[in-house]
Image: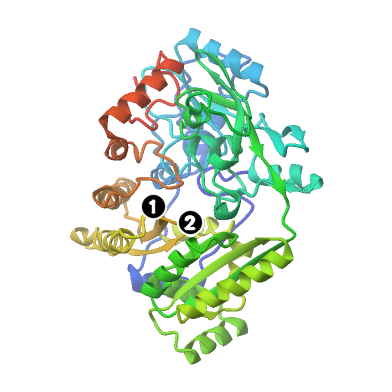
Amino acid sequence: MRRWNGWGDDAVHTTLPPRAAELLQTFVGPATPPRDARLEDVVAAVPASRLRPDDHFDLDPEARVRHARGQSLPDWIALRSGRLGAVPDAVARPASTADVRDLLDLASRLGAAILPYGGGTSVVGGVTVRSTDRPVITVDLGATTGLRHLDLTSGLATLGAGTTGPAIEAALEPHGLTLGHFPQSFDASTVGGWVVTRSAGQQSRGFGRIEDLFAGGHLETPRGPLDLPAHPASSAGPDLREVVLGSEGRLGILTDAIVRAVPRPQLERFSGYVVPDWDRALLLARRLAQSGLPLSMVRVATPLETASTFALAPPTRGSRLLRRYLGWRGMGPERCVVIVAMTGDPSVVGATAKAVDDLVRGSSGVAAPGVGSAWRSSRFAAPYLRNALWDAGYAVDTLETATDWTALPELAVALGRVLRHGLEPAGERVHAFSHLSHVYPTGSSLYTTYVFRLADDPDATLERWRTLKSAASRTIVEHGATISHQHGVGVDHAPYVEAEKGQLGIEAIRTIVGTFDPEGRMARGSLLGEEAS
């Protein structure tokens, strides 16, 4: 079963390695493990629902608690402290498009707000229930799952919007196909969630972001149904798929997604390299992005992230030999790890690997055996470390952005500075480090992780997060970067969207939302940030 107040399966227990605990004490100071609220106590405190029993939804208090929050740090603080605030009045679990239509019509008659809920993995408050005078129905789409139709000739797969990443790949594999969309939340997130948040998979350089994979589908809106045909291309006016992409539940509920599947690659190679310093790592990343080589991923760690990763690695014989080898090759404390994924026909992968090796040597880099494969084997397990860090008394959060190659170096420095010094007035230290997770010919994403100590009072911990998040968000906006490259807007990023879209752009989005949801019942608060009512 999914953990009610943290990440992943509650049967999976991750502990903080002793070496990691020692380093965290050095980086940010010793921490005190918190006393978390018990599920039974939280459930017992849930107020009565404002809705009467109905066959369309569930009023069970535990179900309402389990659907009250997502995976943002404010969500974690609320769940772990038992200070949930608002919870949904009911949880609905429609199994078909007809069920969704009936539910939307019922919500209109009841005057209820609707909050779509896919895998519950939002890290920006996208599924967090907000206080409102209206009753709130959270719509769990877990039953709208499975491969509905497969057109092998065209490579088009119709999936229920609630289908998770592993289920998608399991359904396509017998047909020799893959979607190739692998976000870090792959195990729990859903195709519908990917579409409405404009998700980017870790190998999106090769397979495409979700906007490249989303061919069409079906949206049930408060005004009625919207069908999106899966044409290979069209010049028939504006593309309404683009309206649904990134809409974050404001327009309605996506029930089916038609996606572009591709043949499973014959070979995938994840190769690790190390270059001497950040300047040469950035140059290598840009050259790889602009090379035209068929790469599916380029990932580049800053010196601080590289040092943190090496320091936390288990002291195996292989890791000791790698450190000794890198030292012999002159890779000092400013070294940066680069991981490149090559996907496709073996002959193409072989030729590509040779070209990548040449570019790495041109940046004075060397191969780092085992680094790429080790990262690949653990890439979906990394979020479990959040549970271990919390249990040890540390909060960890991430933020991400994207900008052009010209602005990237200065932005990376500025973000690291505001985060590492953000809590100094409170006498607290922050450990922050970054990597490039997705590269493009014109620029790159920048993904930052930061760790700080939990306070004795959950409200004080929340205030520490607000201080850091707001400072980082302002820095991103001031440098002209996007407020979100892959996590979406949700509630947390909504105050900063106008800086990117402009006043007229925001008015246009509001008009679109009003067209599909004239009563303002859908996912209110997300994307546009207005107060719920």
Where on the picture, by quarter, is residue 171? top right
Residue 282 vs residue 129, the one in the foreground:
282
- Mark 1 near mark 2, Cβ–Cβ under 8 Å? yes
Q: Is residue 347 above or below residue 51?
A: below
Q: Which residue is mark 2?
A: 438
Q: Which residue is mark 1?
A: 402
- Residue 60 placement (x, y as % from top left): 57, 26
In this rendering, the count of numbered labels is 2
State the quadrant of the C terminus.
Answer: top left
Q: Is residue 165 above or below residue 128?
A: below
Give the residue furthest to the bottom.
328
State the quadrant of the N terminus.
Answer: top right
The reply, left or right, for residue 533 in relation to residue 248 is left
Q: Is residue 142 above or below residue 182?
A: above
Q: Is residue 530 visible?
A: no
Q: Judge the density around disc 2: few (<14), some (14-19), many (≥20) Cα neighbours within 10 Å.
A: many
Residue 266 vs residue 455, the one in the foreground:
266
Q: Residue 482, labelled with which disc?
A: none
Q: Secondary structure at mark 1?
A: strand
Q: Amino acid at mark 2?
A: His
Residue 379 vs residue 153, the one in the foreground:
153
Q: Which mark sits nearer the N-terminus, 1 or 2?
A: 1
- Residue 209 placement (x, y as % from top left): 54, 46
The reply, left or right, for residue 311 in relation to residue 255 is left
Residue at image location 30% in from the left, 63% down from the top: 416
